[in-house]
Image (cartoon, rainbow, N blue to C red):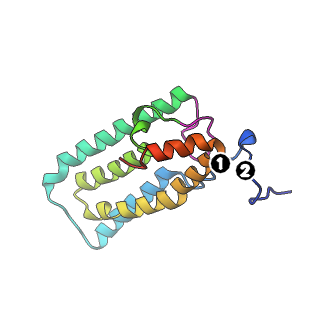
Amino acid sequence: MTANPDKQFDPDNDQRGPGVRVPPPLMVAGSILLGMGLNLIIPLTLSSVVYWPGVSVMAAAVLLALVCALQFLRAKTHIEPWQPTSRIIITGVYRFSRNPIYLAMFMFQIGLGLWLANGWILLCVSLTLRLLSHFVIRKEEAYLLAKFGAEYQAYMQQVRRWF
């Protein structure tokens, strides 16, 4: 017998997590590959002046992602959005942004576009934003609200999604 998807969520018996089906890094990679492919068809080349700023933005993105990963390790909860979570993280970078890992992914894509002087990768950031917002963040927020209720609602009211 299959589980009823309309069944009320039971936060005490959470085995499924937020129901994210495609790992967010794959969505970002797909958007980057689309930008690279479009650049092969219709080049949208930027000035080489953006090379070093791109490297800097990518380095900041990697650093931000590592800081977030450490916070998940310390909290002893899953970083993967398709796994159940045992607690919400509201300290460190999560005091400023509810989605710093996704922010790091956007930053990395922007930095890569600059580093490669590829305008299409930069334009595809809006696609990445829409994909993550629709297929990941909405599901995560609904899941966290169902699981943590008023605690997560208060966090949402205090902390913005981005910066």
148 on left or right of 73? right
Identify the residue under disc 2.
9
Residue name at image x 23 percent, y 42 percent: 56
Q: Nearer the viewer, residue 26 or 129?
A: 129
Q: Is residue 71 above or below residue 155?
A: above
> What main secondary structure does the magenta stretch of the protein show?
loop
Residue at numbered disc 1: 146
- Residue 53 is situated, as x and y percent measured from the top left of the image, at 19, 47
Pointer 1 or 2: first along the chain: 2
Tell me the number on the disc at residue 7: none
Q: In the rendered structure, does residue 102 fall within the stretch colored magenta? A: no
Q: Which residue is at a point 14% across and 59% down the rendered structure image?
A: 47
| Magenta stretch bounds | 76-88
Q: Residues within 10 Å of mark 1 (few under 14, many from 20)?
A: some
Q: Amino acid at mark 1?
A: Ala
Quick one: quadrant of the N terminus?
bottom right
Where does residue 89 sit, x and y in percent of width and height?
A: 51, 35
1 and 2 marks in contact (CB < 8 Å): yes
Residue 81 within the segment the image draws in magenta: yes
